[in-house]
């Protein structure tokens, strides 16, 4: 969460807020996608860590980001940059 918020230059609390503006929702979806891909956490557990969101929200986020990665080179590069930054630290 913090890597994604930092990459997009938004406050972590804003990213986790219930607001649905694209400038907050897309980074939130990316963070959910990365959480699912790079942790062993269950969908409900990931949802809880995103301020109590439902597991179906996490499923939607993962599918949405997977589709965008296939079709949007800029988003793919952003996700790859966040992954590289994360993997450097861990």
Image: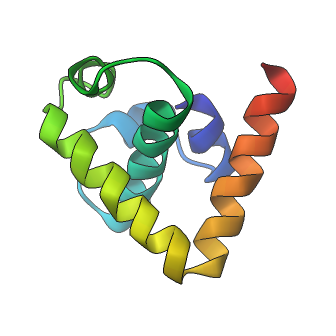
**Residue at (13, 32) in percent of width and height:** 54
Quarter of the image for the C terminus: give it. top right
Q: Can residue 18 be seen by looking at this rendering?
A: no
Residue 84 vs residue 49, the one in the foreground: 84
Residue 80 position (above or below residue 45) = below
The image position of residue 70, as x and y in percent, is 52, 75
Task: From the viewer's perspective, tell me whether residue 75 is left or right of residue 90.
Answer: left
The image position of residue 53, as x and y in percent, is 18, 32
Residue 40 vs residue 65, the one in the foreground: 40
Q: Residue furthest right?
A: 88
Task: From the viewer's perspective, tell me whether residue 4 is left or right of residue 50.
Answer: right
Task: Report the colour scheme.
Answer: rainbow
**Residue at (71, 55) in percent of width and height:** 80
The image position of residue 76, as x and y in percent, is 63, 67
The image position of residue 33, as x and y in percent, is 44, 44
**Residue at (53, 69) in percent of width and height:** 69
Residue 25 position (above or below residue 84) = below
Task: From the viewer's perspective, tell me whether residue 46 is left or right of residue 87.
Answer: left
């Amino acid at each position: 969460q913090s890597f994604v918020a930092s990459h997009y230059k938004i406050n972590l609390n804003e990213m986790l807020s219930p607001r649905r503006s694209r400038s907050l929702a897309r980074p939130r979806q990316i963070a959910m996608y990365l959480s699912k891909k790079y942790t062993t956490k269950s969908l409900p557990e990931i949802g809880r860590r995103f301020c109590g969101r439902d597991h179906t929200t996490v499923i939607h986020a993962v599918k949405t980001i997977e589709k965008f990665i296939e079709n949007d080179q800029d988003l793919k590069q952003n996700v790859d940059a966040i992954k590289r930054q994360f993997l450097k630290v861990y």
